[in-house]
């Protein structure tokens, strides 16, 4: 059962969060800066759709090739406290389209940067457009054909 999405229409995406966390130099050793490690980033936004688009960028040292950009976690509030439902890897410098599970509840996100990042920029869009399955589309076509 496939999904029918309108991903080419920019009006279907709404910017939910953007932030840049600069590098924090804690000391200099042998003429080279030592940076504080980035910690988990709690995204202070409540999402209500299962599809988001995430872009991550960072300063990549000369001569290095980095592709991995960390992980994004979907968190749901429960009677017992926050619970992780889904955890997705991210690619650096790419627009990561994330399709989370279709749980009908609001959720938040946490971003876990790789341990070697010294700075990071995060941009998250929520997909607000049409999100139907091919089964739903077929059912609607049948209903229209029989006049229901």
Image (cartoon, rainbow, N blue to C red):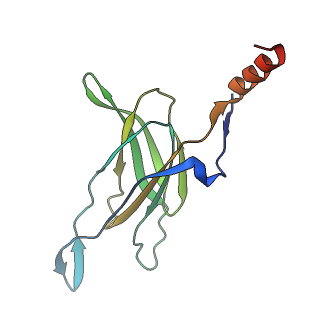
Q: Is residue 128 left or right of residue 58?
A: right
Residue at (64%, 48%) from the top-left corner?
7
Q: How many marks?
A: 0
Q: Quadrant of the N terminus?
A: top right
Up the image or down, 5 lies above or below 26; here it is above
Expressed as whole percent of the image width and height from the top left, the position of residue 140 reads 73, 22
Expressed as whole percent of the image width and height from the top left, the position of residue 13 reads 54, 49
Up the image or down, 112 lies above or below 46; here it is below
Expressed as whole percent of the image width and height from the top left, the position of residue 110 reads 34, 46
Write down the quadrant of residue 133 in the picture.
top right
Name the residue at the front extreme. Answer: 147
Residue at (73%, 20%) from the top-left corner?
139
Write down the quadrant of residue 106 in the picture.
top left
Residue at (72%, 27%) from the top-left corner?
137
Q: Is residue 39 left or right of residue 108?
A: left
Name the residue at the left extreme. Answer: 27
Q: Nearer the viewer, residue 27 or 52?
A: 52
Q: Nearer the viewer, residue 147 or 27?
A: 147
Q: Is residue 1 left or right of residue 48?
A: right
Residue at (71%, 29%) from the top-left corner?
134
Write down the quadrant of residue 27 in the picture.
bottom left
Q: Quadrant of the C terminus?
A: top right
Q: Is residue 87 left or right of residue 117?
A: right
Name the residue at the bottom extreme. Answer: 31
């Amino acid at each position: 059962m496939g999904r029918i999405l309108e991903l080419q229409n920019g009006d279907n995406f709404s910017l939910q969060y953007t932030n840049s966390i600069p590098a924090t130099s804690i000391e200099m050793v042998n003429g080279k800066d030592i940076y504080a490690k980035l910690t988990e980033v709690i995204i202070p936004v409540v999402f209500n759709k299962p599809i988001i688009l995430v872009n991550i960028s960072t300063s990549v040292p000369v001569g290095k090739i980095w592709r991995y950009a960390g992980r994004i976690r979907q968190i749901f509030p429960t009677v017992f406290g926050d619970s992780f439902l889904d955890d997705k890897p991210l690619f650096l410098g790419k627009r990561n389209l994330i399709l989370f599970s279709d749980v009908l509840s609001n959720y938040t996100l946490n971003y876990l940067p790789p341990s070697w990042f010294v700075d990071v920029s995060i941009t998250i869009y929520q997909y607000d457009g049409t999100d139907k399955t091919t089964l739903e589309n077929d059912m609607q076509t049948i209903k229209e054909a029989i006049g229901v």
